[in-house]
């Protein structure tokens, strides 16, 4: 039975359109990333994005993390073109500190290092501009709620732990400006 389901799934998948993408805003934070999206129905797609930042900079500045983000989208006109709405999930393991973020966001990152895990669920809105039959640009914003469990350390290398906590957050779950390539 499992073999039959796998063969049927392979035949269905062959008829799907697949999009490969990368988020330029993740690259701006030195986070290599890749995503794939598959059309399930005339207006529905599902996708998975992954990112990994292994870098530590001078003065122990870091935004290290592993990110996995599945999502589902409903396209208002046709798949991969125009407006869409959707939902996403996020899981990330992170180790960040000695960073000054704009607009006073997370001011404690200036003087402390945080290491932990975060999970979130959010709603998305986006728009895709077709550039050619194989290329497009896509902008996406998502908001939702997340929970993080972390340990807080002094910022110096191997600094002592000063706190441990679990927090619920209203947060952005996605901010993307992606370059998309379509495999047909």
Image: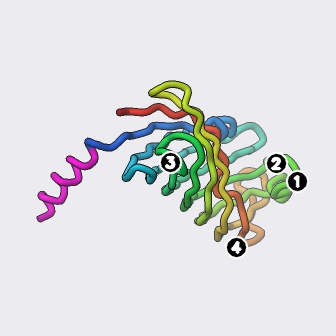
Q: What residue is pinned by disc 4?
A: 168
Q: Residue furthest right?
A: 104
Of the two numbered discs 2 and 3 in the rendering, the one whose residue sits closer to the viewer = 3
Query: For the point 70% across and 55% down, which residue is it?
Result: 158
Residue 46 image position (x, y, % from top left) = 44, 53
Q: Can residue 88 be seen in this view?
A: yes
Q: In this view, does 133 lie above or below 151?
A: above
Q: What element carries label 2?
A: loop
Q: How far apart are marks 3 and 1 (CA)?
A: 28 Å
Apparent side of residue 92 relative to residue 6 in the rendered image (left or right): right
Q: What residue is pinned by disc 1?
A: 104
Are discs 1 and 2 less than 8 Å apart at CB? yes
Apparent side of residue 72 relative to residue 4 in the rendered image (left or right): right
Q: Which mark is residue 49?
A: 3
Residue 10 image position (x, y, % from top left) = 22, 48
Q: What element carries label 3?
A: strand
Query: For the point 68% across and 36% down, which residue is it?
Result: 28
- Sequence-wise first label, 3 or 4: 3
Q: What residue is pinned by disc 2?
A: 101
Q: How far apart are marks 1 and 2 (CA)?
A: 6 Å
Q: How far apart are marks 2 and 4 (CA)?
A: 20 Å
**Which segment did they paint magenta?**
1-13
């Amino acid at each position: 039975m499992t073999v039959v389901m796998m063969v049927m799934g392979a035949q269905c998948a062959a008829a799907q359109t697949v999009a490969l993408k990368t988020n330029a805003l993740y690259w701006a934070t030195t986070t290599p990333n890749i995503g794939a999206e598959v059309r399930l129905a005339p207006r529905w797609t599902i996708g998975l994005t992954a990112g990994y930042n292994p870098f530590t900079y001078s003065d122990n500045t870091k935004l290290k993390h592993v990110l996995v983000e599945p999502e589902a989208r409903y396209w208002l006109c046709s798949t991969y073109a125009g407006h869409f709405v959707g939902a996403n999930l996020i899981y990330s393991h992170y180790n960040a500190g000695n960073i000054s973020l704009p607009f006073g966001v997370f001011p404690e990152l200036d003087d402390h290092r945080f290491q932990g895990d975060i999970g979130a669920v959010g709603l998305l809105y986006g728009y895709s501009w077709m550039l050619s039959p194989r290329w497009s640009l896509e902008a996406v914003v998502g908001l939702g709620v997340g929970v993080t469990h972390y340990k807080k350390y002094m910022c110096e290398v191997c600094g002592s732990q000063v706190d441990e906590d679990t927090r619920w957050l209203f947060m952005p779950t996605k901010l993307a400006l992606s370059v998309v390539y379509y495999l047909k």
